[in-house]
Image: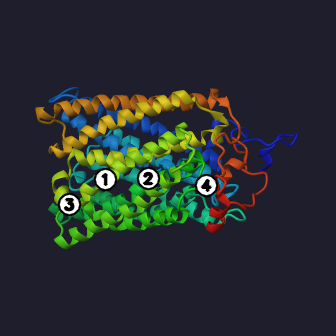
Amino acid sequence: MSAHAATADGKQLNYLNCEKGLWSWIMSIDHKRIGLMYLASILSFFVVGGVFALLVRAELFSHGKTLYGPDDYNVFFTLHGVIMIFLFIVPGIPATLGNFLLPLMIGAKDVIFPRLNRFTYWLYLFGAAIAFCAIFMRLDTGWTFYAPYSIQNRWAVVTATAAAFFLGFASILTGLNFLVTIHNMRAPGMTWGRLPLFVWTLYASAILQIVATPVIGITLLLLLLENTMGIGIFNPAAGGDPVLFEHLFWFYSHPVVYIMILPAMGVVSEIIPVFSKKPIFGYKALVYASVGIAAVSFLVWGHHMFVAGMSNLSRYIFSFLTFFVAVPTAVKVFNWVSTMYKGSISWDTPMLYAMAFVFLFLIAGTTGVHLATLGTDAHYHDTYFVVAHFHYTIQGGAVIGLFAGLHFWFPKMFGRMYNEKVAKFAWLFLFIGFNGTFIPQFILGMEGMPRRYYDYPIEFEPLHRISSIFAFINAAGYAMVLGNLFYAVFKGKKCEENPFHSLSLEWTTASPPIHDNFVQIPRVTTWTYGYGAEHAAEGEAVH
């Protein structure tokens, strides 16, 4: 235990009370404090990115000009995408819940490189500060920075890509820290067969962070050189190839979808057994599915470019591989449903979010089949069908997964409980608002409405109006969620140390945890998912 982790009478101090003051937080190397600082940061950016989304939906409420012109529209939807993807979704669960929970779940005092962990957060803030400069430079390329358009708005693109470059390094270092921690810091008895599924998904996403992120780093560096030196890598006027940029960008950006999604799947895998009061069904299959998704995700980037110009053989291969990635995903859904089968289910707020994740991600997966099919993708490509599919994947998956985890581990993080009635009401608002926003966009896409357009034919107006109205309902749901959690941090009722009766290792220590997590490093002798009378045989089979 650290020298400052106990009072004069030997009483254990939790991580919130060890040292107070903003400077003590900024200089802290405690993984729990770093996780909370990440959480406060990404939720702040989530609110800012959400405001830009509402500005976009408000303009699209009516045919013709509603509030502002097309130039402002391009800036607002670009900033919405850049902030949400690079500042909120990509760090998302790994940097927040991952930082807070990983050492606790494997029985360690901290991550293996705590000072590197602190530096990673500083690097993230530095990249975020640069990204916010682009707000005032009217960045209007879209979050993908497609060339050759991204070579024309030179200094705004240089600023934004420099920010993404630093944010990418933060992602790489986080993945490296997690990977080495999982290999070297597990408590005695925490074998690979006893490792929590959330940790397994952090492991798989860490591999993606380390392997895929350097590709986007090199791509953005080349784009910086293109904009500052005009060397003609992606500019066709100078002999460059803009399609090369698309290949490099999507080689990273499709695996990054699973950096966002895999940890959310891990969260759901932790919640469902607890609230079903049954052992997780098919532990090994879920582990293999996580690693399999990570592996296959590197092979499917080409389905973003079916209409960009490639051979028929390449289209057939990428289409087949894209269908194939659905197999490990289906395994996960089957195992979650099987875990709930004949279980004694408690419909607490974390379980509601877990079920929302399963439902929404199923829609994301089934609509993804249409985009993997060559014939239908040619029609749906760059339409609102893609916008809806993307949001069902990212918002319905990663964001809902984050809020599921926040509600599940909130008592562990703060030792207090949020208002359950308000939480359920906010969930309902959010769920209805989300589906009401994006189901009309599927229809718009099938009718041929292109995405990113400032204006549209009058016949599309009714569906756009429905989408915009429900977008504000969705926003109200998120406002209630955040307000309820923020209030509970300071005024919530103090709760028992393990209110959900989870068997996972992080719940065996105090809530909130003491500074070094455990009075002494635990020795693991049982299976994490041994719920119910039949757990012994299941646990022995896995060990």
Q: Amino acid at mark 1?
A: Thr
Mark 4 — residue? Answer: 102
> Which quadrant holds residue 319?
bottom left
Residue 232, can we see it? no
**Distance between the alpha carbons at the discs numbered 3 and 1:** 37 Å
Identified at 43% across, 64% down, the residue is: 294
- Density class for disc 4 (Cα within 10 Å; few <14, some 14-19, many ≥20) is many
Mark 1 — residue? Answer: 366
Q: Nearer the viewer, residue 445 or 69?
A: 445
- Density class for disc 1 (Cα within 10 Å; few <14, some 14-19, many ≥20) is few
**Distance between the alpha carbons at the discs numbered 4 and 3:** 44 Å
Q: Position of residue 345 (x, y in %)?
A: 55, 43
Q: Position of residue 250 (x, y in %)?
A: 31, 60
Mark 1 secondary-structure assignment: helix
Mark 2 — residue? Answer: 260
Q: Are marks 4 and 2 in contact (CB under 8 Å)?
A: no
Identified at 34% across, 53% down, the residue is: 365
Q: Position of residue 26 (x, y in %)?
A: 61, 43
